[in-house]
Image (cartoon, rainbow, N blue to C red):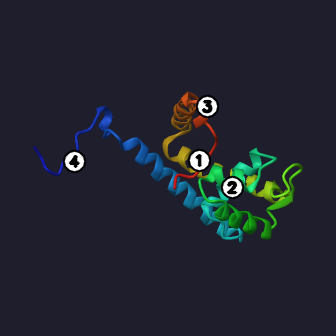
């Protein structure tokens, strides 16, 4: 046996367990593309945690810092720091909670909603680069396979995009 041949492969030259690693690598490259483009556009130094916060806030119009912290899997203090940064940059506003004096409702501002649209455009650029590499039909097949996997998840696991700390 050739010791340089590497681990045994499944059909098609795929190593068992390689798909999650490839997905992580592609996601990291696409994320780097997004952040490079944001810097080129002169945007604030947003971190991936900000992006996850934007997505959560866009989908939860009555979000609180506690809810955001639970979604992100961080402490309330860490989520408060992220909320403060986004508020300072004009991406969100805080309003009194109607029933809990200790809590605040977090809402994206027009600028925050515009950022979500910009992020969608930048993600589409990265996706188009992938389509240019492998072809639109193959990217559609990848999309359909990933959608089938996500749709198969139990309801409690289909909670939206969350970080993997």
Q: How far across and how far down the image is residue 90, in percent?
A: 82, 66
Question: From the viewer's perspective, is residue 43 above or below residue 14?
Answer: below
Question: Which mark is nearer the camera, 4 or 1?
Answer: 4
Q: Are marks 2 and 4 in contact (CB under 8 Å)?
A: no
Write down the residue under mark 4: 6
User: Within 10 Å of the Cα at label 3, are there few (<14), some (14-19), or many (20+) other Cα atoms?
Assistant: few
Question: Which mark is nearer the camera, 2 or 3?
Answer: 3
Secondary structure category for the residue under label 2:
helix
Q: In the visual, does 28 lie left or right of 69?
A: left
Write down the residue under mark 1: 127
* 163 or 70, nearer to the observer: 70
Question: Which mark is nearer the camera, 1 or 3?
Answer: 3
Secondary structure category for the residue under label 4:
loop
Q: How far across and how far down the image is residue 116, in percent?
A: 74, 53
Marked residue nearer the N-terminal end (1 or 2)? 2
Question: Which quadrant of the structure image shows residue 153?
Answer: top right
Q: CA distance from mark 4 to mark 3?
A: 39 Å
Marked residue nearer the N-terminal end (2 or 4)? 4
Mark carried by residue 155: 3
Q: Are marks 1 and 3 in contact (CB under 8 Å)?
A: no
Q: CA distance from mark 1 to mark 3?
A: 27 Å
């Amino acid at each position: 046996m050739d010791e340089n041949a590497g681990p045994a492969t499944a059909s098609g030259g795929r190593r068992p367990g390689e798909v999650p690693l490839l997905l992580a690598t592609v996601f990291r490259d696409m994320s780097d593309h997004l952040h490079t483009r944001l810097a080129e556009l002169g945007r604030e130094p947003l971190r991936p945690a900000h992006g996850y916060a934007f997505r959560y806030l866009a989908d939860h119009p009555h979000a609180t810092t506690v809810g955001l912290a639970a979604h992100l899997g961080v402490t309330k203090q860490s989520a408060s720091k992220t909320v403060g940064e986004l508020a300072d940059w004009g991406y969100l506003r805080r309003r009194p909670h109607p029933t809990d004096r200790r809590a605040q409702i977090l809402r994206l501002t027009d600028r925050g909603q515009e950022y979500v649209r910009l992020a969608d455009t930048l993600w589409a650029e990265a996706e188009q680069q992938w389509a240019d590499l492998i072809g639109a039909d193959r990217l559609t097949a990848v999309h359909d396979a990933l959608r089938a996997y996500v749709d198969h998840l139990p309801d409690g696991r289909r909670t939206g995009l969350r970080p993997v700390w």
